[in-house]
Amino acid sequence: MLRIRFASFRIALCGLVCLVSTAQAANRFRIETQEALPGSTGNEVRLLMDLDQAILGFSVYFEFDATRVTVEDIAPGSDALAVNASWSENPDASWTGAVFVPKIDNSLGRAHCGVVFDFAPEDGSTLTLAAGTGKAVLEITYSVKATASPGTIALDLKNVTNVQPVRKNVMTNIDGNTINPSLTDGSITVPDLTPMIESYTGNSGPSGTEFFILGQNFDLAPLSVKVCSKTAVFSLLADDVTLRVTAPDCSPGPATVEVCNAYGCDSDPSGFTYPEAPGRPEIDSFVDNSGVAGEDFLIVGLNFDQPGLRVSVCQQTAAHVLLNAQTIRATAPSCGAGGWAVVDVCTDLGCDSAVQGFNYTAAAPVINLLVPDEGKPGDSVIVSGLYFAQSGLSVELCGLPATFSLLDDSALNMTVPSCGASGPVDLKICTALGCTTLPGAFTVEATSTSFKRGDSNASGIVDLSDGIFTLNYLFTGGATPGCMDAADADDSGGSAPDLTDAVFTFRFLFLGGEAPPPPGHLACGPDPTTIGDTLDCAVYPPASCR
């Protein structure tokens, strides 16, 4: 977290004045595109800027697929370093260089970065990034996960204003105005290096038969070949596209052939055919094959009384009892997901399977109805749906955890948390079997709590700590303001406070700037602005305003 302690606050923000207007200009943020191999690390891609005017600072936000890419580091680019060679992520009172505050979240796949080129210069001067094209301002270092699937991975520049804190791609010019650039996403292309099976020669016969597989990417180690899930002996011929394979001992009928290398696998369910043998089990029907894990059901068919009887459900071994040659009583194991599961019955003479073998009725939560579907923080809401009575039950409203009590498998009683802003918000319910989100499920009604404009940390007075509190909230994961209206120092409205509000506070306190708009910084009162302002004041504790 950014903590700045000042014995005496000396800051020359120069052009970083109150951001009361928005400059419209042909400016652009863009991230480069490149190709990277699965498992590669230390890859670098640049964020470039096109500018038609000088700027004092900027903030950048982008999202990425965290299941395929890990962002290792974000550092100032060559053009940013040329402006100011001294950078800090945690400046103190004596710091006169640039401020660089990156925040990387590889669990959710997002990165946020705030930059000021000249922080508190002693001589009153201000360093800026000059106008130009292709300005290299950030170096993004990333790795591609070894399990990353082939294809294009977007580095998605975007503005997100419906969460707290807001995440924006903006610049500040020397007049203190906000510049909203156009955004050009970058991308990382992961090539497909997985094996590709194209054709066969001689792919039928008993175990021990040699056959040939033709395809691509067979020359990338380590290579393995399986038939019916059993490891097969093989050799790669000199052409690098042909495998000579010896068929292992498998059950009669079509068998899956699988070829794998370090980058993945390709398989063919009918890759090799073994001669049929008499007496293999056959599944005809089921009795009572729906319910939850632990319930018994019957499998009806033929040839179950052969040696080596085995039963599995969703590839998990199932306890069973052979009643006769045509009937098995099996117990459904835990499969971890709802819906239909495959049932397999095998003996030493072969196997048979049924795709719709057992229907697990427990699944991810289903959200049907909220009563009421609007209200204020602290209100109780009844949520109706399905499959709530599962382990790991959790509830979120407006992205915040909500307290709740489970009524039964189809209903729960939720308490509305302090969302910080009014308007439609999403409801998310999770269990160990999955999550369900209902967009705009609940409308948070605005409150009219009295407050002092600019008192972001709700201390009762407007001072230096309020501007720093807002910066911590925006860029370093600091606490969320309890009263968003108070943090909106310039009364610009919108969906959340931003960098403009912190700069407005500093200018008012130290540069003779305009005082905070009504209700002002001295007297308490409600927010008179309603048009275009969805901010709310959920909590403002100072006794002077109660």
Image: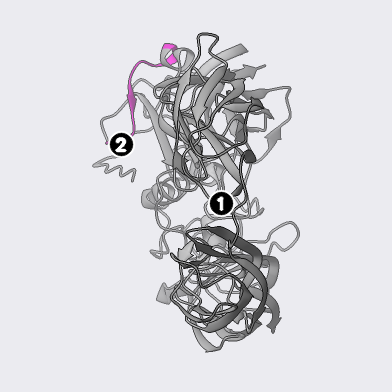
Q: Residue at x 58, y 50 (%)?
A: 252
- Is 83 magenta? The answer is yes
Residue 143 seen in the current view: no
> SS at mark 1?
loop
Q: Nearer the viewer, residue 293 or 497?
A: 293
Which residue position is annotated with label 1? Answer: 497
In the picture as drawn, the residue positioned furthest to the right comes out as: 531
The residue lying furthest to the bottom in this view is: 407
Location of residue 124 by image quarter: top left
Which kind of residue does numbered mark 1 sit on? Pro
Residues marked 1 and 2 touching at CB (< 8 Å) = no
Which of marks 2 and 1 precedes in the sequence? 2
Q: Is residue 317 magenta?
A: no
Residue that protrudes farthest toward the top in the picture:
238
Local secondary structure at mark 2 = loop
Q: In front: 380, or 354?
A: 354
520 with respect to 80 (left or right): right
